[in-house]
Image (spheres, rainbow, N blue to C red):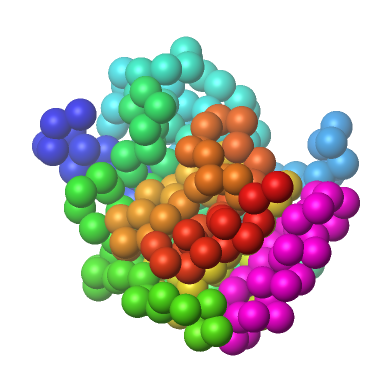
Amino acid sequence: MDSATLAQALAAAKEAAAAAGEVIRHYWQQGVAVELKEDATPVTIADREAEQAIRKILQAALPQASIYGEEYGLDGERGGLMWLVDPLDGTKSFVRRTPFFSTQIALMEGNELILGVSSAPIYGEVMWASAGGGAWMDGVRVQVAGTSAMAQASVSTGNVKTLTSDARWDALGALIRDSNRIRGYGDFCHYHLLARGGLDLVIESDVNILDIAALAVIVREAGGVFTELDGAPLTLDTRSVLAGTPAIHAQALQRLRL
């Protein structure tokens, strides 16, 4: 994608995230009924209307791109240009009145993630990045910390249920013991902190590519490394994350590999 089209796509993604934020703020104030999907995860009218608002803007701005969204699935073909959209990532937090939810919009060209916008409308942060353009938060460029030793590293975990049942659980415990600080910020929050130098390593399992695609672009453009837990590159089937400063990611990968 040429630079002008990429800039146009980024502007559209930011506009779409802002439109979704308006929908979300409306229902945050009003309150919503909660339904359960077939997989027993919650969904609300806020999720659906936010995705509709996003799709309308993205389709108009880049009609040649497919859109793959959390609530309405794939519109178009896989491959080529494809938007990845989670209109309200963190619905469980939303319905329990905690602000740790966000809108996630990414653009994939072939197998490469080239653009990401992460907007947390109640928490009050917006981050974005595009390939080669750096990572930004509210108009200020951000970068990961220079932490290189595990003894100085701040680590955050999220959705680690899968890890409790395999051999990596003991390795994770040892890594935590050797680190400086352990927290569980979860959702968008720990990736935002990583990208702006507030922590050094994020470990997650049981995720969906729509949850983390935009965040991967942001962390990478901030100078970090973002892979699956085994070091593999992200795909549409990704279910785990290891993200961190280059040095801390490399150390954690060596320790967590089965």
Q: Quadrant of residue 173?
A: bottom right
Lateral position of residue 32 relative to residue 195, left or right: right
Q: Is residue 178 above or below residue 93?
A: below
Magenta highlight range? 154-181
Quick check: can you spot residue 38? yes
Give 140 or 26, whichever is nearer the viewer: 140
Give 185 or 86, whichever is nearer the viewer: 185
Q: Is residue 235 above or below residue 19?
A: above
Quick check: can you spot residue 185? no
Q: Is residue 115 above or below residue 63?
A: below
Q: Quadrant of residue 137?
A: bottom left
x and y percent of residue 6 in the render?
21, 38
x and y percent of residue 142 in the render?
30, 70
Residue at image coords 64%, 50%: 257
Give 13 or 200, whichever is nearer the viewer: 200
Task: Please say whether residue 41 is one of the residues in the magenta stretch.
Answer: no
Lateral position of residue 140 relative to residue 48, left or right: left
Give the residue furthest to the top: 77
Residue at image coords 49%, 73%: 200
